[in-house]
Image: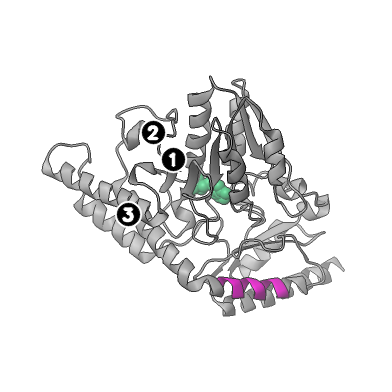
Amino acid sequence: MIYLDNSATTKPYQEVIDSFTQVSQKYYGNPSSIHRTGAEAEKLLLRARQQAADLLEVKEEEIVFTSGGTEGNNTAIKGIALAHHNRGKHIITSQIEHPSVLEACKGLEDFGFRVTYLPVNHQGLIEPADVEAAITEETILVSIMHVNNELGAIQPIKEIGEITKRYPKLHFHVDHVQGFGKVPLSLSDSGIDLCTISGHKIHGLKGTGLLFAKKGTHLFPLMHGGGQERSIRSGTENLAGSVALVKAIRLILEEQRQKSQHLLDMKERLWNCLDGMEQVTTNSPAGHAPHIINISVPGYKPEVLIHALSEKGFYISTKSACSSKNEDVSSVLAACGLSESRSSSALRISLSYHNQLQEIEGFCKAFDEVLHQFSEIMG
Ligand SMILES: Cc1ncc(COP(=O)(O)O)c(C=O)c1O
């Protein structure tokens, strides 16, 4: 099987699984317990937090371990909204965010918050000037993703951070779930106050992730209880998951340093072959992330192509996994101004450092065969 759906989830590194197993077996104590087993678990948790901070080049007290991207995004958005509503009730985000951002914002509208959903251009990009124009006295949060999960468009985070920095009342949150480990972004140097990372998108485990919350950022917790994770996320810590997450972060950053060119080579090969196919239109914008390629095959139902490819052992997806069963039209592609025939026939191929050029060659051949097969049937 050739797995080309790495933006939906990734295969965990063996070292990550080993870490999780070892820690679960050896350090099962509760980090809050006073006895030695608890103290050992607490020490390991502190070490994992420090290592995560070192790898991300931030401070140890700025790391909050979470269960993944959805929790990180909700904690950041609702946490800021509920902690700072006395200062203002306006939030700025974009029309092409992940549902964990869009739905969190929509939920807040029921509580009197006003949300501006910024448009994007044909390339799926936000204009930083639009962010600035939308800021009012009431704005407390700007939440913009780094890499879009369907298109691979890379938002100008640094430029937006330069703007938000000038407004002391504002917090800037970045959903970095798709970009982390593939597209560099400095957390300490981009005006970012909050940043979400998910473990299972970087060959870590499902149910793991972290939220970077800049020192001094006050969040209302989603979960009240024993005060773990600096009271931002109460509940007995997932020590094995946190250690495994740090391992995944270390390994993916190493791969990013060593294998970026390999990813680019595969993307280029894939792009050239798809671009040359008559029925295919490529949707990902120029300069997009190296691991996500979005295409449309107008006139074809994406599910049918996905099943046919799956029969041949190639796994890709339509839109994102989180919304792929819901509707036909991709709201992300529609927001970019693409026609309905393109927005409803989109496919996403997403790569990892572990894919090989031969797999890309194999995919191109299989895809070509599938298209020929269907065009013959359709006459
Ligand atoms: C951009 C983006 N943000 C957030 C999430 C949610 O992450 P998780 O699956 O870890 O909850 C995803 C998952 O697809 C995503 O692509």
> Quick one: label 1 or label 2, which is nearer the N terminus?
1
Instruction: Please report contact status of discs 1 and 3: CB closer than 8 Å, yes or no.
Output: no
Vertical relation: 60 (above or below) 290: above
Tell me which amino acid carries mark 1: Ala
Q: Which residue is drawn at 54% across and 32% down?
A: 168
Residue 51 circle label = 3
Residue 213 circle label = 1
Question: Which stretch is magenta?
Answer: 263-272
Q: Which residue is drawn at 41% across and 54% down?
A: 56
Q: Is mark 1 on a helix, strand or loop?
A: strand
**Relative to the observer, which residue lies in front, 295 or 118?**
118
In terms of image quadrants, where is residue 94?
A: top right
**Residue 235 position within the rendered picture, expressed as x and y whole percent measured from the top left:** 33, 34
Q: Say whether residue 98 is visible.
A: no
Instruction: Please report contact status of discs 1 and 2: CB closer than 8 Å, yes or no.
Output: yes
> Quick one: label 2 or label 3, which is nearer the N terminus?
3
Vertical relation: 261 (above or below) 287: below
Q: What element carries label 3?
A: helix
